[in-house]
Image (spheres, grey):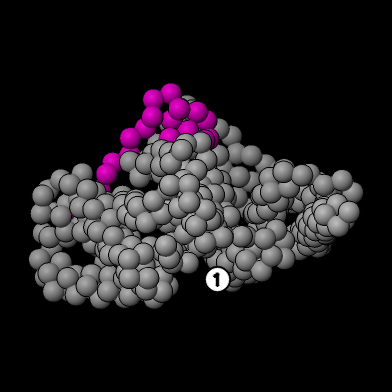
Amino acid sequence: MTATTTALSSKSAAEQAHLMRNRAYGVAFIVIALAMYWLFAQGVDPALISRYGLNQGTVPAAERLPDWEVPTYGTVTFLAMISAAIGAYQLARGFGRATSVMLGLIALFFVFAFLTWATRDQSINLAGMLRNMVLRAVPLTLGALSGILCERAGVVNIAIEGLMLSGAMMAAFIGSVADNLWVGVLAATLTGGLLAFVHAVLSIHYKVDQIISGTVINIFSAGITSYISSKFLQTYQELNNPGTFQNVPIPVLSKIPLIGGIFFESNIYTYGAYILLIVVHVGLFYTRWGLRVRAVGEHPKAADTLGINVFRVRYLNVVLGGLVAGFAGSYFTLGSVGRFDELMTAGRGFISLAAMIFGKWTPFGAAGASLIFGLAEALQGRLAILKVPIPSSFLLMAPYIATMIALAGLIGRAVPPAADGQPYEK
């Protein structure tokens, strides 16, 4: 009788929590809809038109698409109404597993409503902005995948910033010395793996606090790269001139109107991010290796009891994460500017961690969050051109505020692996 009562009580508590979560999402959706209308439609002349350019500069004249024109007031009002309807349905019935998809859709509506309001009686090159978004999201996605590989196995790795920075320097230096971009990529990747191994030894073998270990690597990387840059790379320019990878259009796919030039006409880093995204997702959720990794990250004691070598799994994943972070670092030199500058990663390793958290420790969720961060960066420079009366720094703050909301559990809780950051004792 007692067991039955306890089971019913647990079920009732779970249902109550699910209902409260549905209500929180529903209320949030409706609040966003009201804010959308109040901020971007209220007081706007219904006669104003917003224009979106759908062509990049490289598109031949014969293949160019006409600009997309939409009524500013009508478009924003329509998006607000759809968002409110989604919120009402969420309150009444709930979308179940599709709730996260609805949240992403409403976020997309809000961004599009903002752009439509910002371009009222003006125009913006949508294709160019989206391409810039994808390019800025590439290193963030790779960094987030690095973090996922580590934290899914239960090891916190805030050293991604340092791994990326060291990888960027080694890519430029070795790539210049060898006069070969691929050798530079290999050097950057191995550098990231080596520093990650140091982090693994400190965190797993010596059980040093993982945050402190990662911080030490970040400080070391910032110091050593700045020293080498000022002592050698700035003095001997031939050691800091590796060049960059050229864009390689994918046949057929790159010819697709609008999206072809955005997603399928880039360099190896964009395509590498696509491949690694799929490999990590499939590996974590559809293979025996992934099952072991997730078991070690959630219940290492139980995994050990079943014969899984917890230490080996953690070492392997941290080093794999370091290899990915080193590859991500080489993007800044070999995939972007063609030289190394001090502290050029500019905190993107930490932004990658925010994307990982916002994406709830899943590869595709982290990639989506990286695109949001990339969009915020891409929009920053265009707001001044459009003369929008909003400081561009506010736009950059938005994704971080959303990450803090997710961490606080106000709208959907971001829950890390249960054993994340906990040293394992046999």
User: Residue under circle 1?
Assistant: 393
Pointer 1 local density, CA inside 10 Å: few below 14, some 14–19, many at least 20:
few
- The foreground one among 166 and 234 is 166
Quarter-of-image position of residue 408: bottom right
Q: Residue at x 52, y 40 (%)?
A: 285
Q: Is residue 24 left or right of residue 354?
A: right
**258 within the magenta span:** yes
Judge whether residue 304 can be spotted in this image.
yes
Judge whether residue 343 can be spotted in this image.
no
- The foreground one among 77 and 241 is 241
- The foreground one among 69 and 141 is 141
Q: Position of residue 387 (x, y in %)?
A: 59, 65
Disc 1 residue type?
Ser
**37 within the magenta span:** no
Q: Which residues are magenta?
A: 241-264
Q: Residue at x 55, y 39 (%)?
A: 54
Q: Position of residue 64 (x, y in %)?
A: 51, 32
Q: Is residue 35 left or right of residue 232?
A: right
Q: Position of residue 295 (x, y in %)?
A: 51, 50
